[in-house]
């Protein structure tokens, strides 16, 4: 049985080196994973702090499941808002230094919900070209005008803001760009938003737990005081090691999202035990700041060790360290060659990144050892010369 238009489309993807395949993990996430029958040194997760398989989180999950059961059974507004959800929201608000926070089931849903609640037909969204797919989809869903400016180009953004006649203006940006690892210039973006009366949505999926001395994210990194204009959003499935996402900001904004964010209203609340485990995760991030320091050491070791000529390591101070290779097929070949050495680094190809900029996306974790980094560095240095 085959449906020929799909067969053709799949064959075309295969020819272009763009067909994606999944690898099945047979054990927990971590610096070392079992992929099928293979032991793998992994540089492919967003578990930046090594918390995804932390015993304290698993223990909290078990005891919370014993107390609250597994399913929330309902949406937050219709009777599924349970004590662990509420406590986590309060903790997230104080952790990020904002008045209030609202829990979503995923970052993708948070972005859809926040953006489409805040802007509509007569409004305009100003978005960095390299923003995460969920922010682009959110803009489409909102029906607002979607004005995408070149990556980090503040003067292009300012021109568009100045020219806009929109009723409400919303600037949206990844705080840390997920495929490049660079950081948005948040103080300058905020100044532009003030000058042009716009709101600023920061998606700190990759900064939360990582950036700033105590892991509070991009606002701590830049030392930015809470502003009424900033809607802070971050995910809880990356550095926080579990699942979910949240929006944080002024109490009024959060109350408005409760009324209007459809991906909050029309969906089942996350299992309460996950929310309880997340509270434990935040305690660990708060009390064990060695993880952020450790990450910084590992990032420095990688940068120092790689001696690349044809390939190029991007400018990034975050645990996302992309190596630009260029062609889809060569990138795939390098990823495969690493895999043969039991090292897993994903090949990222268009449309996730622009054409001609296929890359290895190395992501580092506080759980990596110095020897792990040395092994990756040696393998890449050798492969660049022989492939
Ligand atoms: C991962 C990611 C999301 C989506 O978060 P999920 O919780 O995985 O749905 C949103 N924005 C950015 C920048 C991301 O990297």
Image (cartoon, rainbow, N blue to C red):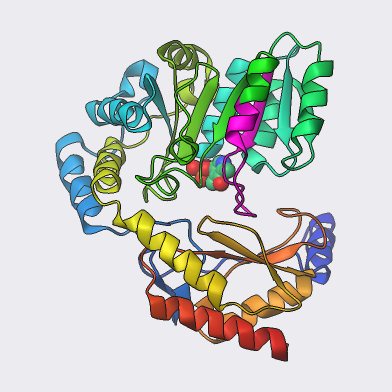
- Residue 149 in view: yes
The percent coordinates of residue 334 (x first, y second) are 67, 79
Using residue 207 as the reference point, say whether residue 169 is left or right of it: right
Q: Quadrant of ligand 1?
A: top right
Using residue 92 as the reference point, say whether residue 43 is left or right of it: right
The percent coordinates of residue 16 (x first, y second) are 82, 67
The percent coordinates of residue 259 (x first, y second) are 48, 11
364 and 53: which one is in front? 364
Using residue 344 as the reference point, say whether residue 357 is left or right of it: right
The percent coordinates of residue 240 (x first, y second) are 37, 47
Q: Which residues are magenta?
A: 169-190
Q: Residue at x 68, y 23 (%)?
A: 192
- Give residue 137's quadrant in the image: top right
352 and 382: which one is in front? 382
Relative height, residue 92 to residue 329 (above, below): above
Q: Residue at x 52, y 20 (%)?
A: 261
- Residue 52 in view: no
Tell whether position 263 is magenta: no
Relative height, residue 333 to residue 286 (above, below): below
């Amino acid at each position: 049985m085959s449906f020929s238009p799909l067969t053709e489309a799949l064959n075309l993807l295969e020819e272009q080196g763009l067909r994606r395949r999944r690898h099945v993990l047979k054990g927990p996430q971590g610096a070392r994973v079992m992929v099928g029958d293979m032991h793998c040194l992994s540089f492919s997760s967003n578990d930046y702090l090594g918390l995804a398989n932390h015993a304290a989180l698993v223990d909290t999950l078990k005891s919370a499941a014993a107390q609250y059961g597994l399913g929330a059974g309902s949406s937050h507004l219709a009777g599924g808002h349970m004590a662990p959800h509420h406590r986590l929201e309060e903790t997230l608000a104080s952790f990020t230094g904002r008045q209030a926070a609202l829990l979503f089931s995923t970052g993708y849903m948070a972005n859809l919900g926040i953006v489409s609640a805040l802007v509509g037909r007569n409004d305009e969204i100003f978005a960095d070209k390299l923003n995460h797919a969920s922010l682009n989809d959110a803009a489409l869903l909102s029906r607002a005008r979607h004005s995408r400016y070149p990556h980090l180009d503040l003067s292009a953004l300012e021109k568009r803001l100045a020219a806009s006649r929109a009723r409400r203006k919303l600037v949206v940006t990844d705080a840390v760009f997920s495929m490049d690892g660079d950081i948005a210039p948040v103080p300058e973006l905020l100044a532009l938003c003030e000058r042009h009366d716009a709101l600023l949505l920061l998606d700190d999926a990759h900064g939360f737990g990582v950036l700033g001395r105590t892991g509070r994210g991009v606002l701590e990194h830049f030392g930015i005081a809470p502003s009424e204009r900033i809607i802070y959003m971050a995910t809880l499935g990356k550095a926080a090691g579990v699942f979910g996402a949240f929006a944080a900001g002024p109490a009024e904004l959060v109350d408005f999202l409760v009324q209007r964010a459809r991906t909050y209203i029309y969906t089942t609340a996350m299992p309460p035990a996950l929310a309880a485990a997340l509270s434990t995760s935040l305690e660990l991030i708060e009390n064990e700041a060695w993880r952020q320091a450790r990450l910084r050491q590992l990032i420095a070791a990688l940068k120092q060790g790689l001696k690349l000529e044809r390939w190029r390591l991007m400018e990034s101070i975050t645990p996302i360290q992309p190596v630009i290779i260029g062609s889809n097929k060569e990138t795939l070949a390098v990823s495969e060659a690493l895999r043969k050495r039991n090292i897993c680094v994903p090949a990222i190809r268009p449309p996730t990144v622009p054409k001609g900029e296929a890359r290895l996306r190395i992501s580092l974790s506080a759980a990596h050892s110095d020897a792990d980094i040395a092994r990756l560095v040696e393998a890449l240095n050798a492969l660049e010369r022989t492939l």
